[in-house]
Image (cartoon, helix red, strand yellow):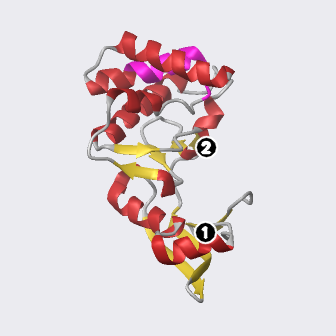
Amino acid sequence: FQKRNILRLINGIVVKQFATPNVLRGIIYGTLSKSKAQRSYEYALRMKELTPTPIAYREIHICGILRESWYACSKSECQHTFNELIGRPDFPNRETILTAIGQFTAKLHKRHILHQDYSGGNILFNKEGTKIEVIDLNRVRFCSSLTHKKRLQNFERLNIDREALRTIATAYAIAMGEDPNTTAEYIIAHRWKKHIK
């Protein structure tokens, strides 16, 4: 798969080659900040079963400037992405899968993990809805605490119908010990407000 980054599958290992940064970013990643590859690897080690198993990362620096980087992890057992649920009310086990995604999101937030690109392409699931994982970890944040508002805003990028959002939100609220109706109404109102804009 090739877009901004390149993904290759090699003997059951997924290798992500990150786009070459411009010179300024190359200097920053080479001296002041960890590269996307390093962050992906280190964050995956901390997240364990919430993401495919990390294997390694690799960087090439020229004169202290990051020029190329890769991240390798095991191939996920989850065959589908959240995007496949959008516009498909007849997707097999859809209700079960949506419920599992809500519960999974609660698990992330209980561990104070905030995925800042929590969108359709980054949420994986198996066809039974018994396993959920997230990928694209370089924008994950490990917070000392998460406010109620910050947690609910984390659903903003899930561009799916209202009833599906309600199912996710209800499962999430129950797992968090919160009111399902209030939670669902907030998530729906703010997701669709942003979507309309």
Q: Find residue 130 and report its image quarter.
A: top left
Where is residue 188 shown, x and y percent of the image?
Answer: 52, 17
Give the prevailing secondary structure in the magenta stretch.
helix
Range covered by the magenta-colored residues: 159-170
| 105 relative to 124 in the view: left or right | left
Residue nearest the observer in this picture, 18 or 77: 18
Residue highlighted by disc 1: 25
Residue at the far top: name it.
181
Residue 160 in the magenta stretch? The answer is: yes
The image's mark for residue 115 is none
Above or below 168: residue 10: below
Residue under the point 33% across and 27% down: 148
CA neighbours of label 1 inside 10 A, class few (<14), some (14 to 19), many (20+): some
Residue 157 in the magenta stretch? The answer is: no
Residue under the point 47% across and 62% down: 40
Residue at the far right: name it.
2
| 40 relative to 147 in the view: left or right | right
Does the rendering let one see residue 114?
A: yes
CA neighbours of label 2 inside 10 A, class few (<14), some (14 to 19), many (20+): some
Does the rendering let one see residue 10?
A: no
Residue highlighted by disc 2: 121
Where is residue 143 shown, x and y percent of the image?
Answer: 32, 47
Residue nearest the observer in this picture, 11 or 134: 134
| 60 relative to 38 in the view: left or right | right
Above or below 106: residue 13: below
Q: Find residue 99 and report its image quarter.
A: top left
